[in-house]
């Protein structure tokens, strides 16, 4: 490990698991190291959209890089997928980070890599967001470790099947807690702290939170709910002249392990690279964008959404393979 002087610690427990699952202790660990610059970012530029921001700039001179260097970041769903990649980008920028998810072994590995990549400080806390107490505990921990917060990145999601609706209302209720209510609770606990720092609240959503698609009933509902809640909150913050920005991130299919596994043989569409998706989200938050779309052309789709609804639905359905579900 290339990390500088550091120490690790673990302890404490009070977050519980969903009914029927073994109890998950809330565990914490932390490491610290010296500051690094944001140089040395290496992400493939090959498939980048024509008028997206150049990733090349992030290697050393990208403007928001300065604003992220030393920024205090709380990142949820950081053990795998897009969250893991965001953790690495924030680290290259020299941020101070608190990571959270349920699996401590994965978080430990991500934390170690973050230190190698240049994070100023990294801490993690294990928490299951299906527990109503978890969000407040996590924000409290981040505040304790970082002394404040500049970016809150809400990214985690609970597992959900990619298939036809089977009438499982209990699953929808549980998913609402993990994907929506916990976001609301994390945001409300962090808002006073973000107001102090004039910080950013970054909400990771999906195209299925703007345009309904098959096989995603409950997931789609949770993502539409995020848009409703956080877009309304954005108005209210502006009306109260609170300088906290809310960035809603609309993502298409991204090539995370989980997404590829779930959609295999079920969709006719290609997945976009996870590292670029992660960087687009970070850039959106750092530049205080209202909404971020990745890939970029999703913004056009969303603009056209309600123009020809019948034709739209036929086109959408043609991208899904029903027989293999
Ligand atoms: P992922 O790889 O499945 O990662 C999900 C993260 O959430 C993991 O760190 C997981 O870690 C954590 N998590 C799962 N259940 C949790 C729980 N009950 N409490 C706390 N944390 C929990 O997902 P992803 O594909 O990176 O998605 C990240 C974000 O991008 C999500 O908001 C998703 O909706 C959005 N998005 C993804 C795609 C895509 O194609 N991948 C497309 C559109 C939008 P543990 O299991 O260790 O807890």
Image (tube, grey):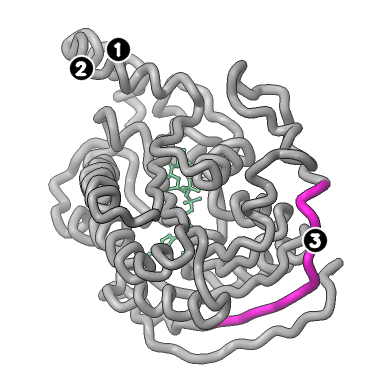
Q: Give the structural element (helix, strand or loop) at label 3.
A: loop
Q: Nearer the viewer, residue 184 or 24?
A: 184
Report x, y in % for residue 293.
45, 31
Crowd band around label 1 with a 10 angstrom C-alpha radius: few (<14), some (14–19), many (20+) = few
Q: Is residue 13 left or right of residue 58?
A: left
Closer to us: mark 1 or mark 3?
A: 3
SS category of the residue bearing label 2: loop
Separation of marks 1 and 3 at Cα, in angstroms = 48 Å
Q: Is residue 224 visible?
A: yes
105 above or below 306?
below
Q: Nearer the viewer, residue 293 or 252?
A: 293
Which residue range is magenta in the image? 28-39
Tell me the crowding category of disc 2: few under 14, some 14 to 19, or many 20 or more residues within 10 angstroms, Cα based. few
Q: Quadrant of the C terminus?
A: top left
The residue located at (61%, 72%) in the rendering is 105
Q: Earlier in the sequence, mark 2 or mark 1?
A: 2
* Distance in Å between CA atoms under marks 2 and 1: 13 Å
Q: Is residue 77 left or right of residue 225?
A: right
Relative image position of residue 103 (x, y in whole percent): 52, 70
The residue under label 2 is 306
Q: Disc 3 designates what residue?
A: 36
Residue 126: x and y, percent?
49, 75
Residue 300 shown in magenta: no
- Residue closest to the far front: 241
Instruction: Report how far apart the C-alphas of labels 3 and 2 lie in the structure.
Output: 47 Å
User: What's the mark number on residue 315?
Assistant: 1
Report how many numbered discs are placed on residues in the image.
3
Q: Residue at x 30, y 24 (%)?
A: 322
């Amino acid at each position: 490990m290339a990390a500088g002087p550091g120490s690790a610690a673990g302890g404490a427990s009070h977050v519980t698991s969903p009914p029927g699952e073994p109890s998950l202790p809330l565990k914490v660990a932390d490491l610290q190291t010296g500051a690094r610059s944001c140089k040395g970012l290496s992400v493939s530029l090959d498939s980048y959209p024509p008028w997206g921001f150049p990733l090349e700039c992030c290697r050393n001179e990208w403007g928001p890089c300065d604003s992220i260097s030393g920024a205090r970041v709380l990142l949820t769903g950081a053990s795998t997928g897009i969250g893991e990649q965001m953790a690495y980008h924030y680290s290259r920028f020299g941020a101070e980070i608190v990571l959270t998810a349920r699996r401590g072994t994965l978080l430990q590995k991500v934390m170690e890599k973050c230190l190698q990549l240049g994070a100023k400080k990294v801490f993690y806390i294990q928490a299951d967001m299906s527990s109503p107490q978890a969000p407040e505990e996590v924000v409290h921990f981040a505040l304790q470790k970082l002394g404040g917060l500049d970016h809150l990145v809400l990214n985690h999601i609970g597992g959900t099947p990619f298939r036809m609706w089977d009438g499982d209302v209990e699953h929808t209720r549980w998913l609402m807690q993990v994907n929506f209510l916990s976001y609301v609770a994390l945001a409300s606990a962090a808002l006073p702290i973000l107001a102090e720092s004039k910080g950013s609240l970054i909400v990771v959503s999906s195209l299925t939170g703007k345009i309904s698609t098959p096989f995603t009933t409950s997931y789609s509902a949770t993502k539409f709910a995020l848009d409703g809640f956080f877009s309304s909150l954005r108005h209210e913050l502006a009306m109260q002249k609170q300088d906290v920005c809310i960035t809603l991130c609309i993502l298409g299919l991204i090539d995370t392990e989980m997404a590829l596994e779930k959609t295999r043989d079920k969709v006719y569409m290609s997945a976009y690279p996870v590292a670029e998706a992660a960087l687009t989200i970070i850039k959106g938050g750092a530049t205080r964008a209202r909404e971020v779309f990745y890939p970029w052309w999703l913004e056009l789709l969303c603009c056209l959404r309600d123009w020809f609804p019948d034709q739209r639905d036929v086109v959408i359905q043609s991208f899904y393979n029903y027989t293999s579900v």
